Amino acid sequence: MALSIIDYAARLTEQEYLNGRRQMAANAGLEPAEFQARVETVRTHLMALAEAPSQPPHAPQKFRKKDRDESGLSGQRATPAPGRPDSPAPSRDSSGQTANPAPHFELVEAGIGPTPGVYWCDVVRDRGTITGQASPEWICGRLRVTAMTRDAQNGEWGRLLVFQDADANEHRWTCPQSMHAGNGDELRSMLLREGLTITANPRLRRMVGDYIQSESPNVRARCVSRTGWHGDVYVLPRQTFGDTEAAPVLFQAATIDSISLAQGGTLEGWLNNVSAPCVGNSRLVFVICMGFAGPCLGLVDDDGGGIHLRGSSSTGKTTALRISASVYGPPSYAGTWRATDNGLEGVAAMHSDMLVILDELSQLEPRHAGQVAYLLANGQGKSRSHRDGSPRLPARWRVLFLSAGEIGLADLVAESGGRARAGQEVRVIDLAADAGAGLGLFDRVPDGVAPGVFADALRRACGTHYGHALPTFLKVLVANPGRAREILRALRSSIADKLAPHDASGQVQRVANRFALVAAAGELATAYKLTGWETGEAERAAQVCFRAWFEARGTAGNAEPVAMLSQVRAFLEVNGDARFSRWGAADSARTINRAGFRKDSAAGPTYFVERECFRREVCQGFDPQAVARALANTGALQTDGRNFSCKPLLPDGRRTRVYVILPALWGDE
């Protein structure tokens, strides 16, 4: 038989009263609102009896004042109802009853009382009149709004959310206010991914956004939309280095799970098992230095760019990428080139002043290859517009990137029918992965250890110890960024002077500066005891790698003239007999699609190239004037003193301008 209302009221403890009201109503055969009203009436009478000398044996326990705050729930804080930020929080009288019931949120931190979390406390209405406070309804786990954020222009407002997951790990996310523009699904999805527990009740879960917006903490923080340096403060998605409590700086974005920054093992374990064993291996030391050079790029305000390790399969390229990634996090920190140019733009924007690691260049669409080289290095995304057509600020970044693949950028561009430009090759520096010692990527391996076994040991160590070097390095940099900046610039200048010849072109000097910055970052990290190397190891590795690149390039001059001469040679070699009539030959009229005439001599053939053919076919992809100048500078073009073309009498009786290419063209090979 169901108990009477007075039995329920007399036997309730505070915990049971707050948490079991709905079930009790069902057992009593009443609607929740009617049951609540009756219980409140009975409890009021019982409270009065509890203060009388003859207290009934089943009177409910009195609520201790110290167990409550002004909201009436232990460890709770009341928040006005959404849309009514100026509404006063409800208070309770001495008997625990609501004095001025109003819709509001309550945050239960911990202690005696309901399950910790955010509660929605509605009111009971009888024909439009508020008659009391409804039972608190749980919305989500403990979610605190600790600061309001805005950018330097007082835009992009947001709120810093702090909560714990099921393992009691604290999460901090600066949520943009723009995420409240829709139905809130994206906001809740992000919170759930981060580990916040949210009710499955459709009506209540929609209130998570209302609760966040109703909170107005006094703390103000500056938000930024990209990682890296902002003044002398360095910002990561979940951590900021160098800010103060008076001027906090926070990373704010719709998602923070696109960068695999994490820690495993120990810093000492990484030094002993990953970094130190790489000593003497130029490529391995160099890629570790690149990890430290990522933040240094922004510190000295240098241009972005990348290094591409090119080599055949099983050379050890992937091992090198994992070793470099261990400076930042687990092996998953390294990504792949399998993405569109828009996708890579998003990756770059999330890794500003960091090292981006991308494997398997061959997975990149050939038609995008040339654009991507400029995209990543130049640090600015596409210009886009809002729905109304107004321009939107393009994404900006500054990244150093490490790449690997069996082919180089020029090969990939050629697959799409294009030709790699010198600017692309300077931005994505092609470095042979094979160190030339017969050990693939390695210059040396420990005595008695095969290269494959050594590579496996390094890969296992990278999967155990990772992610400690970067935050330790950043803490030292932000402690005195001005001093670190001076040291880096001095080291970079000194090392670059040793790398490039004094008569080197600007392109070679630019590559030398990038190698020098990587070496300087490695030497600075060594001075901070973060590598396990002796001083000079990073510089030696950079010298070996730069020498390999320089020898493969073959010239200290600019790459364009070399490419132009190569293209002219290739055209003449392929078409020399088929499209050039021999000088003085009787059957010259039978030459199909003739490009000009050819005169043989002991020194070699001289080609008289028709002017339009020279401009449209021989110089395809280049400026014809620049090609002619390159030929003239090497003594491979006959001029009339004023023009690059001459006007001889041709065998067919015409006197017209042609480009006379001399045998000296082949002597320059």
Image (cartoon, helix red, strand yellow):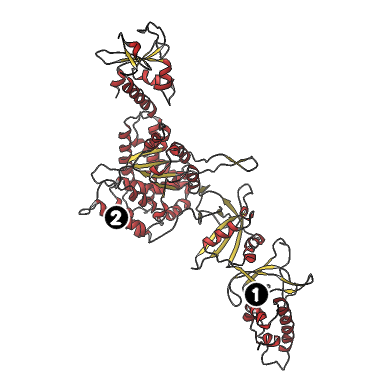
Residue 233 circle label: none
Q: Nearer the viewer, residue 632 or 234?
A: 632
- Name the residue located 62 percent from the left edge and 50 percent from the top edge: 156
Question: According to the image, label 2 marks what residue?
Answer: 456
Crowdedness of circle 2 by 10 Å Cα count: few (<14), some, many (20+)? Answer: few
Q: Report the mark closest to the observer, 1 or 2.
A: 2
Residue 223 showing in the rendered view: yes
The crowd level at tag 1 (other Cα within 10 Å; few <14, some 14-19, many 20+) is many
Above or below, 476 against 544 in this view is below
Amino acid on which the number 2 mark rests in the picture: Asp
- The residue type indicated by label 1 comes to Leu
Residue drawn at the location 59% of the way across and 64% of the way down: 144
Q: Position of residue 408 (x, y in %)?
A: 36, 38
Residue 262 location in percent, x, y?
A: 44, 58
Q: Viewer-proximal residue, 409 or 150? A: 409
Q: Say if mark 1 contacts mark 2, CB within 8 Å.
A: no
- Which type of secondary structure does the marked residue at label 1 adopt? loop
In the displayed structure, would residue 428 be above or below residue 163? above
**For residue 464, side relative to residue 220 (left or right):** left
Q: Is mark 2 on a helix, strand or loop?
A: helix
- Residue 566's quadrant in the figure? top left
**Nearest to N terminus: mark 1 or mark 2:** 1
Task: Check residue 73 in the rendering and tell me which mark sits there, or answer none.
Answer: 1
Front-lying residue, 536 or 402: 402
Q: Picture coordinates of residue 242 (x, y %)?
A: 51, 53
Q: Residue furthest left?
A: 448
